[in-house]
Amino acid sequence: MKSLAIAMGTYNALIWRTLIAVIIAIILFIFKPFKWPNKQALQVHIIRGGVTSIMAFTFFWGLARTPIAEAIAISFIAPLIALYLSAILLGETIEQKAIFASMLGLGGVGIIIAAKIQGEFSNDAQWGIAAILFSATLYAWNLVLQRQQALVANPIEIATFQNSIVSLILLSFAPWFLHPPEITYAPELIGAAFCGVISSMLISWGYARAQAQALVPLEYSIFIWACLFGWIYFNESVSISTLLGTILIISGCLIATWQNKPPKEPHQPIPNID
């Protein structure tokens, strides 16, 4: 998606990938008995589709202007933002450890940005980081919606409706921005669409079977792949400041989501009622 966003522009890369993803998802969908989602599921599909369309566009727009590892590292702040969103939207109390964790995470982001400022920091890079931070805020909301969606719909339904809704939203801008892709981009577009559909289904399947707080830390393995693919495909090196900032952000997220297991209650013998 980074190479496509650079070559085609973010809008065209995203909309053509999403349209292909809709076709793939529908093909998978027809192999299951069709059942139109109920009102609750449809509402979650629409809300998450709207959030995803803006979140994806701002992330890929920023990714085209920022090294992959740095973009992924900055996006890791999303779980910390989710803590404060839960306080605002759900009235939850923010614990002291969460405040400490958020300070660690913000410190990690600050280290990465400070290193960029001291080096070559073009206007594109500046706006790229801003776009990724905005996308991370939406992703924090997406984490909550992702769990809600996984509890009311199966993975194939989620992939079908999410890509369809995102496509409809993006198509509303087609008269001004849409351009037909060159045939040479077809393999990358199909590959990106296939990866998007399969990953969406796997994530939905996982979130339906475990709490978000247990699964979110697993997403930090993305940083390993971001470093590897950034180096292989774009010759991007990973700076010490990026590694240090990432460690602080991940540490903050783990501290915030860590929960002590409640002590086991002593075994109580079943009384004899005979």
Image (cartoon, helix red, strand yellow):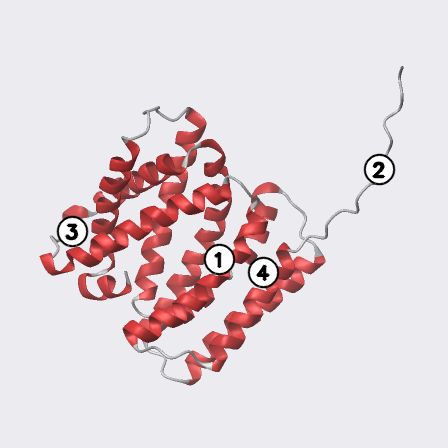
The amino acid pointed to by label 4 is Cys
In the displayed image of the protein, which residue is found farthest to the top?
A: 274
- Between circles 1 and 2, the one closer to the viewer is 2
Q: Disc 2 marks which residue?
A: 267
Q: Is 71 or 226 nearer to us in this picture? A: 226
Quarter of the image that includes the C terminus: top right
The residues tagged by marks 2 and 4 sit, at their Cα atoms, a distance apart of 35 Å
Earlier-in-chain disc, 3 versus 4: 3
Q: What number is the disc on residue 253?
A: 4
The structure residue drawn at horizontal position 24% and vertical position 36%, both measured from the top left corner, is 27
Q: Is residue 192 above or below residue 23?
A: below
Residue 60 locus on image (x, y percent) = 32, 60
Give the alpha-carbon distance from disc 3 to disc 2, as whole Å.
66 Å
**Which residue bears the numbered disc 3?**
178
Among numbered discs 1 and 2, the one appearing first in the sequence: 1
Q: How far is the residue under mark 1 from the one under mark 3?
A: 32 Å
| Residue marked by disc 1 | 219
Q: Mark 2 near mark 4, Cβ–Cβ under 8 Å?
A: no
Q: Earlier in the sequence, mark 2 or mark 4?
A: 4
Per the image, label 3 sits on a secondary structure element best described as: loop
Mark 1–mark 2 Cα distance, whole angstroms, equals 37 Å
- On the question of residue 66 being in view, the answer is no
**Closest to the observer, 156 or 236:** 156
The crowd level at tag 4 (other Cα within 10 Å; few <14, some 14-19, many 20+) is many
Residue drawn at the location 58% of the way across and 50% of the way down:
213
**Circle 2: residue type:** His
Residue drawn at x 49%, y 52% as measured from the top left: 140
Q: Give the Cα separation between the discs numbered 3 and 4.
A: 39 Å
Tag 1 near tag 3, CB within 8 Å? no
Q: Residue 182: name its quadrant.
A: bottom left
